[in-house]
């Protein structure tokens, strides 16, 4: 500010004075030179003033050319100019410096940031565009404290978890509300069957194109989201697309084109040892799952070819007929690199074109198109997206403003299935399930993956009970194809100068075609999979959102100003799906229901495919902001919601909110003009929200089961059954309360920015899915009980280390920690949140939400050492207990941006401290003797550390194979042995970009030209996992879930890097 | 002004929406419970009952060495979670639907259906007590009225079950509306079908009395009374098999025997290992199995019970059958069969009791279940891997109560209690009934067995005589009981419920192979409570596996 004033003064003396006239004329533009309309120009200390026209010009009568004019515009720094100065090019600086920054808060209300009594994190387009990932949410990772993001797997297009300020619900959904250009946007992940079957599902925010996003704001606390009602209780991700921009270009038309090319590689594979091969107890056993076999020799031993088998395959063809070339053949017993060579380098290509145009005197028009082809490192995995967007805005002469956006997204995602594996064959087809522990002597490329006669899978095991990973890639396909239209239309009417009325309709409609196709001839997952399966499901999702909003502002007196916003909203969400699953393929290779013998409408897990769910949520809300002298702000608001999920008596709830913001640096003269403390804002807020739970939990239904059994006389039986969910008509909304305090400050000559928040949220009367002892007659019911509290700290520090003419260096640190605690009523012992009932994530009274329970090794109460039994093995607890807490102690990220002239070098490092994970990949590859962790002399017996029942040290010798496979692998009821601390550090992003100076482009048709080299997930280290497993804990086998911490051979993560070029003209 | 405006808008909007909010409360995915139908409940109940028996039987089959128990110790063999399925099937599958069906059926005077529901409910209650001891009953299945039921004493539950059987017997006498096709056991389309149900209810009473005979001073009188009952007498002179029959329908829906589904698969080989002791009992104990049928002197049921994928020992190696290179464990008593028990040359490929070593690549070699009672293949030395739709294509049965069992119970009671009847004659009838049932089975599922492979009447008689000779040599009650129970055990293939009960009650067969690990521990006397019970019900605490059920007054540790 001060600098700017100085600058203006210089300007004043540099030009000839213009002498006394009563009317001054001028033009206001932004720093790019684009004209700004609606800018307020006032004579200081009076009510005299005007606003700029569409082309930025204004004229104003002044008595004295020495009077100061105050130029203010929402979103820009306020400046003062002397009326007598040259007003032809008043340039306003965008309010990135904070003091005058304007943010969009709930329901599209624009507020100066200093007036907010709560934290809002904002991520600019610069942090989102030209990245090698098409998933907007993944790009937010580490960029906003309080926002916790976890990929479900390294597959391109796989689902993504996003959780804001911890999980506040035990049984409900914790996905935040997505608002795109002011209207709700469905962000669900429509998984078709349990995670066990590994049907990777993308999350529907994948349909957004990061390159056409202008800005993302994350409203974290309830103070920020109350106006959105119960749907905003998990936080709100406010996405503003370039299509909805009302910024008028400085040129009449501007076209921006960018092209990117990235490589997508597997980020982590174990370091396998090359000394020992397949078998058990050091005996050469080529056909074993485990790699505890003989030592490799030079020259290599030879073993009988595994396809030289006397038996015939169950699909009917004798092996020796199918593979005559291998009769009598031998294979060398030597190490291979099957796993490494299985993966590809995928290519990611992104093209995007954006057009922005000024139409007439007041209109804007934007169009964006983007194409992305993201090929995974796993064969068979690919994501193709086409996104189209149009937006326009026009201020009409009759006080109406009309605007709207229209987006069309086509997403095509496919991947091979990745069903869960406990380290010994997967539950169904899985591309990773048998791959990661391929015995060292097996060269999967030399072993034909299919029987040439019947196309069935063939592999090295005598019983042919492992599905060849290449067979899986060539014959098993899952995916989704989405056609989606979303956008909004709005009509605003200015009732008076300070009072307007806005009607807005939002729509989000998509059809979601899901498929799981598998040819016959597989060997895992039972007959349904082995004989060929074809499941197609069509989902239809619709959101209709209507809002009527009014905004009014008035200056009560010299010191007080009042803004009131109020509105009503109706939101109807519908999800409906139907489909068919066919089994027993007739002719190999054709995926068509006609080519299958059996048809039903149950998915792989037995769940019904056909269902529908429709909910209506109504709300009436109001919010008032009382400002005092530009340094104290009180916001009071509230909303009443009505939901169709609960019975009439319980379906309405009112929840208020209040927040306060105070700026000592503006209020107290003594704090002004300090070089140490430039700006300080204190804020506090208390707010509430509600949750109505899922629909249809208040009334029992009868299950109708047709065709449940066919007897020997071909009589078809149908049945009635009483479902296992006990309805609860008295269910009432759960109430959430949050208190947050914080401060924002700028120190050391504006070089250091601090933003600190502490929050404490308590969600009471949780709508719990309480599991019941089946002897009650039911297995689950919804009840109101228990609470979850989340307390956390969010801290953002930005330090401007260097700023001079050529060099700039900024460093930002984000810090986030969250502690949750569950309180349950005394008659509820625990609740399974996800996973399995004997190995899963639980809510337990007094514990953090989502602790891991599994069976564990028993410990000697005296010494605390593990108990061993007569066999020299540990003693399993035979029951579950807490073996870990997946919640990290804290998460941090450090973002460094170094600039030199046109060059910019950016790095983002993420660090997570603590958080446990029950991971089968390390257990399996170590327990099966594959990695260098087990490259020791295996002929020596081992004694597992521990004590016998009588308290004396264990002295029972066991073989290395036994110790690792039967005990340490975690396969046999001792899961605490495979729970690891998931502390990790990661180079999340690095980029180097160069923007050609505009001066050099003046003679070219280009307005801007830049080149960026960037990469993601370039390095990571998780030191507490077995060293040579190189395990990356940033994955979750549960897919998209409230909780994390379980891993069932979900595969490696991805590393991406490449180059982007962008031009505008 | 503005507020009024908003208020009016809100009220009008909400008013029109109130009706919609009400409408959306109705779940569109299913009808209301009032539309329930007794016949459709009956189907659900019978399917759940079969599923309960199948689950309960699996545990008993493993414990009694019919199939493998991986162990390696009894302590580690099962976790509480292992029993969640069978528990849930009993309470939310059998009891819930029986309780829903009975009042509807009684109101509609569908007495047979009501009696069927009571019979199946009673059997399920008895079996739960046999497995777990004390269980929730009087406070169970009350829904929201009690979500934490408390346990009742096992003896009280037994008494309640017997009362249910009495009520069912009364219902079967009131026959007016026959369920016909809806009866998946007998297809009771007339009074004859109702009579069969009445006999089943009485046989279940007999079974309950025999189960509890050790703790019931009046057992002899009660059993004698039942043995004199005309319905029971009728079953002792004819047949009255109570079995759930599966069909050959592979999909849409899969209606085959669940154990067939798991063993006759397209790839990877059978899912189960056969127990070494049971195979030895049939193939080696009383004769020698020979691939050349003419030289075969083993149990006539052998080829019906088991299907061998390989008929020789060519595939046996330390890599495929690791126990083949191990000596017989030193803690085994003399004669306890181990590993290939000398018959490896014929391809009997099983797994020892309590062997939890990793699964070797033995998919194409394991012996699997045969045609009886699982609907598998009849073994005529095919030596070919299993495959989908082989043999009887899954048209097996759950042998819940076969006629032979009634003879065995009568023989046992005669020896132990001195009830009516000649135990030797009853034993012979029992064995003959079992063999006749097994040998007659293929024709009931449309499988033709080549005549040369069907044991001749002479061979059956030779077998019966061999057993009777053993019986005649037995002088003590215990020795006689050993012979009876060995035969009872063999006839119980596929019914682990009674095999487990018999072993705990009589300690027979006494020569069952121990767990391969010396530290295997003592036999489970009752199972852990399921984890869903212990973890979700605040009134229950876990119990130990050496806790004996109320009718088991044998000393601790008397069976391994």
Image (tube, coloured by chain):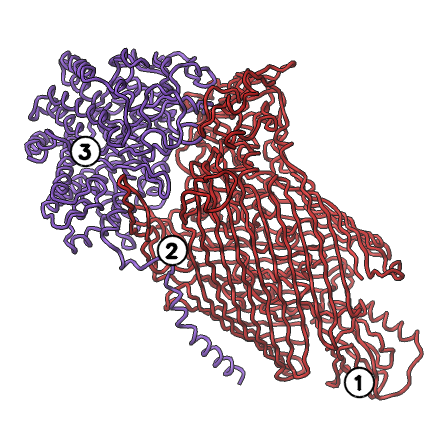
Q: Which chain is red?
A: A
Horizontal side of B458 relative to A348 (left or right) equals left
Choose between A622 and A140: the one closer to the eye: A140
Whether A111 is drawn above or below A1016: the answer is: below
On the image, the x and y values in percent for residue A65 come to 86, 84
Choose between A32 and A771: the one closer to the eye: A32
On the image, the x and y values in percent for residue A290 come to 52, 25
Horizontal side of A769 relative to A178 (left or right) equals left
- Earlier in the chain: of badge 2 and badge 1, it is 1
Q: Which chain is purple?
A: B
Asked whether the residues under the numbered discs 3 and 1 touch, taking CB atoms below 8 Å apart as contact, a structural biologist would say no
On the image, the x and y values in percent for residue B304 come to 28, 24
Q: Disc 3 to disc 1, how far (Cα)?
A: 106 Å
Choose between A225 and B230: the one closer to the eye: B230
Please identify, in this view, whether the residue under mark 3 or under mark 2 is nearer the observer. Answer: 3
Horizontal side of A896 relative to B115 (left or right) equals right
At 35% across and 46% down in the image, what residue appears? B536
**Element marked by disc 2:** strand
Identify the residue position indicated by label 1 in the image: A60
| Figure quadrant of residue A77 | bottom right
Whether B475 is drawn above or below A654: the answer is: above
Identify the residue position indicated by label 2 in the image: A782
At 23% across and 52% down in the image, what residue appears? B100
Residue B241 shows which numbered tag? 3
Q: Disc 2 to disc 1, how far (Cα)?
A: 66 Å
Chain bearing tag 1 is A
**Element marked by disc 3:** loop
Please identify, in this view, whether the residue under mark 3 or under mark 1 is nearer the observer. Answer: 3
């Amino acid at each position: 500010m001060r600098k700017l004033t100085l600058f203006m003064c210089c300007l004043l003396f540099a030009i000839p004075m213009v002498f006394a006239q009563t009317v001054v004329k001028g033009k206001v533009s932004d720093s790019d030179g684009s004209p700004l309309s609606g800018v307020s120009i006032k004579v200081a200390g009076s009510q005299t003033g005007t606003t700029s026209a569409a082309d930025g010009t204004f004229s104003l009568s002044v008595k004295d050319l020495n009077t100061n004019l105050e130029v203010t515009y929402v979103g820009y720094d306020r400046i003062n100019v002397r009326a007598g100065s040259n007003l032809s090019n008043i340039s306003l600086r965008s309010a990135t410096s904070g003091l005058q920054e304007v943010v969009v808060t709930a329901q599209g209300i624009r507020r100066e940031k200093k007036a907010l009594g709560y934290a809002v994190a904002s991520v600019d387009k610069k942090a989102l565009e030209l990245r090698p990932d098409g998933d907007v949410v993944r790009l937010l990772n580490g960029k906003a404290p309080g926002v916790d993001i976890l990929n479900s797997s390294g597959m391109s297009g796989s689902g993504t978890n996003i959780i804001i300020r911890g999980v506040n619900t035990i049984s409900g959904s914790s996905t935040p509300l997505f608002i795109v250009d002011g209207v709700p946007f469905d962000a669900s992940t429509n998984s078709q069957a349990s995670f066990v079957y590994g049907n990777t599902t993308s999350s529907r925010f994948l349909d957004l194109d990061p390159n056409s996003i202008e800005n993302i704001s994350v409203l974290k606390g309830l103070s920020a989201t109350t106006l959105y009602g119960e749907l905003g209780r998990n936080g709100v991700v406010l996405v503003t697309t370039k299509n909805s921009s009302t910024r008028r270009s400085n040129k009449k038309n501007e076209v921006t084109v960018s092209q990117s090319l990235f490589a997508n590689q597997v980020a982590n594979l174990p370091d396998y040892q090359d000394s020992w091969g397949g078998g058990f107890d050091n005996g050469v056993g080529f056909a074993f799952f485990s790699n505890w076999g003989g030592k490799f020799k030079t020259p290599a031993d030879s073993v009988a070819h595994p396809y030289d088998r006397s038996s015939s395959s169950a699909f009917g063809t004798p092996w020796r007929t199918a593979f005559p070339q291998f009769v009598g053949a031998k294979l060398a017993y030597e190490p291979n690199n099957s796993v490494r060579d299985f993966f590809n380098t995928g290519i990611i290509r992104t093209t995007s074109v954006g057009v922005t145009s000024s139409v007439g005197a007041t209109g804007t028009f934007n169009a964006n198109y983007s194409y992305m082809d993201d090929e995974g490192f796993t064969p068979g995995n690919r994501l193709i997206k086409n996104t189209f967007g149009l937006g326009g805005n026009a201020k009409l002469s009759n006080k109406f403003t009309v605007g709207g956006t229209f987006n069309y997204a086509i997403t095509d995602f496919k991947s091979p299935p990745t069903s869960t594996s406990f380290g010994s064959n997967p539950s169904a087809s899985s591309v990773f399930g048998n791959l990661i522990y391929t015995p060292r002597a097996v060269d999967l490329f030399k072993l034909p993956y299919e029987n040439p006669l019947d196309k069935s899978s063939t592999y090295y095991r005598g019983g042919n009970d492992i599905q060849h990973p290449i067979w899986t890639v060539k014959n098993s396909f899952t995916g989704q194809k989405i056609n989606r239209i979303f956008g909004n239309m709005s009509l605003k009417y200015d009732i008076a100068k300070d009072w307007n009325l806005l009607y807005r309709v939002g729509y989000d409609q998509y059809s979601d075609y899901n498929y799981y196709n598998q040819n016959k001839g597989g060997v895992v997952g039972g007959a349904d999979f082995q004989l060929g399966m074809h499941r197609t499901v069509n989902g239809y999702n619709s959101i209709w959102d209507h809002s009527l909003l009014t905004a009014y502002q008035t200056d009560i007196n010299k010191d007080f100003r009042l803004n009131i916003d109020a509105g009503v909203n109706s939101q109807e969400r519908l999800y409906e799906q139907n489909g068919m699953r066919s089994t027993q393929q007739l002719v190999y290779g054709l995926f068509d229901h006609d080519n299958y013998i059996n048809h039903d409408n149950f998915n792989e897990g037995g769940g019904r495919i056909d269902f529908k769910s429709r909910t209506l949520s109504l709300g009436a809300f109001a919010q008032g902001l009382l400002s005092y002298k530009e340094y104290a702000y009180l916001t009071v608001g509230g909303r009443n919601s009505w939901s169709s999920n609960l019975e009439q008596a319980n379906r309405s709830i009112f929840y208020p909110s209040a927040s306060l913001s105070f700026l000592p640096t503006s209020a107290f003269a003594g704090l002004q003009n300090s070089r140490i403390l430039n700006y300080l804002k204190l804020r506090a807020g208390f707010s509430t929200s509600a949750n109505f739970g899922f629909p249809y939990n208040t009334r029992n239904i009868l299950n109708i089961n047709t065709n449940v059994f066919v007897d020997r006389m071909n009589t078809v039986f149908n049945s009635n059954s009483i479902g296992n969910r006990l309805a609860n008509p008295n269910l009432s909304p759960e109430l959430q309360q949050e208190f947050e305090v914080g401060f924002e400050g700028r120190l050391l000559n504006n070089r250091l920015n601090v933003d600190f928040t502490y929050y404490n949220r308590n969600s009471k009367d949780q709508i719990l899915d309480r599991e019941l002892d089946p002897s009650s007659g039911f297995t689950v019911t919804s009840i109101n009980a228990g609470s979850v509290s989340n307390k956390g700290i969010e801290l953002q520090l930005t330090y401007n280390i260097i700023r001079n003419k050529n060099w700039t260096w900024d460093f930002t640190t984000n810090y986030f920690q969250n502690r949750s605690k569950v309180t349950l009523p005394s008659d509820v012992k625990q609740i399974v949140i996800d996973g399995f009932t004997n190995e899963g994530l639980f809510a337990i009274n007094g514990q953090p939400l989502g602790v891991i329970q599994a069976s564990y090794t028993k410990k000697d109460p005296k010494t605390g050492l593990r108990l061993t039994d007569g066999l020299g093995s540990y003693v399993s607890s035979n029951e579950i207990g807490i073996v870990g807490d997946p919640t990290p102690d804290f998460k941090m990220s450090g973002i460094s941006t170094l600039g030199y002239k046109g060059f910019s070098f950016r790095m983002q490092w993420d660090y997570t401290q603590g958080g446990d994970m029950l991971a089968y990949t390390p257990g399996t590859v170590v327990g099966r003797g594959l990695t260098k962790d087990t490259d020791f002399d295996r002929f020596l017996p081992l004694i597992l550390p521990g004590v016998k029942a009588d308290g004396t040290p264990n002295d029972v010798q066991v073989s290395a194979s036994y110790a690792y496979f039967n005990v340490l692998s975690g396969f046999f009821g001792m899961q605490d042995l495979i729970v690891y601390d998931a502390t990790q550090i990661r180079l999340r992003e690095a980029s180097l970009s160069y923007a050609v100076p505009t001066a050099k482009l003046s003679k070219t048709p280009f307005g801007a030209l830049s080149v960026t080299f960037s990469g993601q997930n370039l390095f990571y280290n998780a030191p507490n996992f077995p060293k040579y497993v190189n395990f990356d804990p940033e994955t979750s086998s549960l897919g998209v879930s409230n909780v994390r911490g379980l891993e069932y051979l979900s595969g490696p993560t991805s590393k991406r890097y490449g180059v982007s070029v962008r031009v505008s003209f | 002004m503005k507020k009024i405006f908003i208020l009016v808008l809100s009220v009008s909007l909400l008013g029109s929406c109130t009706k919609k909010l009400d409408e959306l409360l109705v779940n569109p995915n299913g009808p209301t419970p009032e539309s329930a139908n007794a016949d459709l409940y009956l189907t659900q109940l019978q399917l759940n009952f079969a599923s309960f028996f199948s689950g309960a039987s699996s545990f008993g089959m493993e414990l009694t060495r019919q199939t493998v128990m991986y162990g390696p110790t009894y302590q580690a063999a099962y976790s509480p979670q292992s029993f969640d399925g069978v528990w849930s099937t009993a309470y939310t599958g059998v009891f819930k639907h029986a309780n829903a069906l009975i009042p509807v059926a009684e109101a509609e005077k569908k007495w047979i259906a009501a009696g069927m529901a009571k019979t199946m409910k009673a059997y399920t209650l008895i079996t739960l007590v046999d497995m777990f001891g004390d269980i929730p009953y009087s406070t169970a299945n009350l829904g929201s009225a009690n979500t934490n039921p408390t346990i009742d004493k096992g003896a009280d539950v037994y008494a309640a079950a017997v009362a249910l059987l009495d009520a069912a017997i009364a219902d079967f006498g009131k026959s007016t509306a026959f369920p016909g096709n809806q009866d998946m056991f007998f297809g009771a389309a007339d009074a004859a079908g109702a009579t069969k149900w009445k006999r089943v209810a009485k046989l279940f009473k007999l079974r309950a009395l025999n189960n509890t005979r050790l703790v019931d001073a009046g057992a002899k009188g009660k059993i004698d009374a039942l043995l004199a009952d005309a319905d029971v007498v009728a079953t002792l002179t004819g047949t009255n098999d109570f079995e759930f029959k599966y069909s050959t329908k592979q999909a849409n829906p899969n209606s085959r025997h669940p154990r067939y589904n798991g063993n006759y698969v397209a790839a990877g080989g059978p899912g189960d290992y056969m127990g070494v002791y049971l195979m030895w009992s049939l193939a080696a104990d009383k004769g020698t199995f020979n691939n050349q049928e003419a030289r075969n002197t083993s149990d006539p049921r052998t080829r019906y019970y088991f299907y061998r994928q390989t008929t020789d020992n060519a595939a046996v190696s330390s890599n495929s059958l690791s126990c083949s290179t191990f000596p017989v464990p030193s803690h085994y008593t003399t004669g306890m069969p181990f590993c290939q028990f000398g018959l490896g040359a014929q391809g009997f490929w099983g797994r020892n009791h309590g062997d939890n070593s990793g699964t070797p690549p033995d998919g194409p070699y394991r012996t699997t279940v045969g045609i009886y009672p699982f609907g598998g293949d009849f073994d005529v030395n095919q030596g070919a891997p299993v495959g989908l739709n082989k043999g009887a294509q899954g048209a097996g049965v759950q042998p819940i109560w076969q006629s032979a069992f009634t003879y065995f119970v009568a023989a046992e009671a005669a020896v132990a209690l001195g009830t009516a009847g000649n135990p030797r004659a009853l034993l012979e009838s029992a064995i003959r009934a079992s063999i006749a049932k097994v040998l007659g089975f293929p024709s009931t599922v449309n499988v033709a067995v080549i005549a040369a492979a069907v044991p001749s009447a002479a061979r059956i008689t030779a077998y019966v005589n061999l057993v009777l000779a053993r019986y005649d040599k037995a002088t003590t009650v215990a020795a006689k009981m050993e012979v009876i129970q060995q035969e009872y055990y063999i006839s119980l293939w596929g019914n682990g419920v009674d095999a487990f009960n018999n072993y705990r009650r009589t300690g027979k067969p006494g020569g069952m192979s121990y767990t391969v690990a010396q530290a295997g521990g003592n036999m489970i006397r009752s199972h852990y409570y399921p984890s869903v019970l212990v973890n979700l019900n605040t009134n229950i605490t876990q119990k130990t596996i050496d806790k004996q059920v109320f009718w088991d007054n044998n000393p601790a540790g008397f069976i391994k």
